Amino acid sequence: MRRGTCHNFERCSTAAGRKILDIPDADPFECPGCGSGLRALAFTERFPAGFLAFLTFQIVFLSLLAWRWTTGSPRTALAGTSGNIILRIAGSNTIGSSLGPALAEGFLKQLGASDIESRPGSSPEEKNVSGKLPGARSASTITIAAHGSATAFTGLREGSCDIGAASRKIKSDEVGALSSLGDMTSVASEHVVGLDGVAIIVNSANPLQSIRIDQLAEIFSGAVLDWSQVGGQPGPIAVYSRDDKSGTYDTFKTLILGGNRLVSTAKRFEDSNLLSDAVAEDVHGIGFIGLPYIHSAKALAIATSGTQPLLPNLLTVATEDYALSRRLYLYTADKTQNKFARAFIEFALSQPGQDIVAVAGFVSQNIRLEEAAVPDNAPGPYRTLVQGAKRLSLDFRFRSGNSDLDNKAAVDLQRMAAFFSDFRYRSENILLLGFADNIGGRNSNIQLSRERAKKVREEFERRGLNPSVVDGFGSDLPVASNDTNDGREKNRRVEVWLKDAS
């Protein structure tokens, strides 16, 4: 069963009575009274008063089963751990360095654990978070091994982790290798835990303020060796890079290097903090890093073909308008037998979990209203529509190759319904503005962009939300280059604005 509430207050007596509905997993998650989509209850709201203590006891009991290997022997504690291991997370250093441990601590707190502590593991990239669950005699431990995104998928394949953390999307060969665990690209297996921007960093004394992606490709491949060739002061360029196992490097290689090889003189780092510190101390240095690791270095604004330079910030990364924005993923088997893995994913995607994502320095998916500057090259009708409106901190995007909303959008629709359950905001003031890439003629692209906006409106209406404006602007206002598949996917989007949102 799934539990939820209807928020179609003006038209539905079930919503007006604030009744909690139990919906079988096989049925649409809709109100039987009015057909509106339901808002899923948070983890701690799903149970009647007085039941949480019983639930916690059951979780502890079931964890005894999860502690056994297939041989039937209990999982023994690793070096640096305290007590029994209930959950194993492996993969991205970007996620595992600080965000993973913070989420683990928050998760244990939600389960009512006491004496929570984080200890180093057997290497600097490993951490163990432990706490004593209610009724348990010994501590329960969540292990985090952050050796790079590639190790998320080898760990899942080998059965050495329950959750794979990746700062890039799973590759097709990895999907095939993990087919025994289900479709790893499905909403049941692929979970977007937060957003990040790959920041291009230089020494704070570097006079450059922005740079184009094609210039970055030349620098990091070794075709450009002196800062004067890209508008800077004369001097040699020193390149800093993450190592081959890093998801940040994979993302950078895909978005920047393409088919080119990284210059052989690049200094390689496994640790994000060490890379950032090295660039900050080198007046000739340039490197790339996740947003939380900029520290005392300086981030450059990034431009692509046909776009204006943008700095990575909360809005440009949340909407994925920033050219080097990226999603952070947690992957699980679609029917994982570890109940703690499923509960951890649910917690990480919830509002409290996303608050932790923000505190860790990444961009959360909790919806915010933001003042957004209208680009100078915006078409007149677009400018008129958004005048006096605020932009919501998400865009809706679509699965590659079809018109279905992607996995992130599926969860964002629930967040949107919860956002508009606050009576300060009226859904009738929503503007849905669609965009397309530049493949095809102008008229067909405008039609495609309107169809995408209508697709989102249909999902909104199923949840009792009634946008007042649904329009499309074709290939206008690209946020990424249309010369690449990744860029075209980013340009196929639907923006969400809100009028009179004071």
Image (cartoon, grey):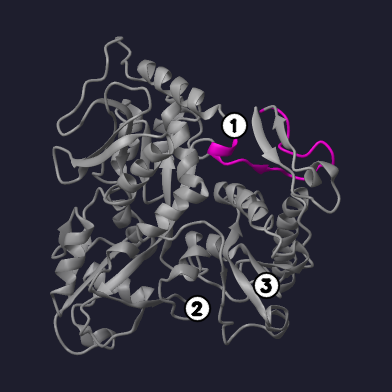
Q: Quadrant of the C terminus?
A: bottom right
Q: Amino acid at mark 3?
A: Ala
Identify residue for label 2.
307
Q: Contact, CB < 8 Å: mark 1 with mark 3?
A: no
- Nearer to me, 456 or 315: 315
Mark 2–mark 1 contact, CB under 8 Å?
no
Residue occupying the point 76% across, 56% down: 465
Q: Main secondary structure of the magenta part?
A: loop
Of the residues shown, which amino acid type is indicated by label 2?
A: Thr
Asked if residue 229 is positioned above or below residue 424 in the image, the reply reads below
Sequence-wise first label, 1 or 3:
1
Q: Position of residue 334 (x, y in %)?
A: 50, 30
- On the question of residue 473 being in view, the answer is no
Q: Residue furthest top?
A: 72
Q: Position of residue 260 (x, y in %)?
A: 29, 62
Residue 26 shown in magenta? yes
Q: Look at mark 3 in the image and give the residue it sits on.
A: 501
For the residues labelled 1 and 3, the Cα–Cα distance comes to 35 Å
Label 2 CA crowd tier, 10 Å (few <14, some 14–19, many 20+):
some
Name the N-terminal-most of marks 2 and 3. Answer: 2
Q: Secondary structure at mark 2?
A: loop
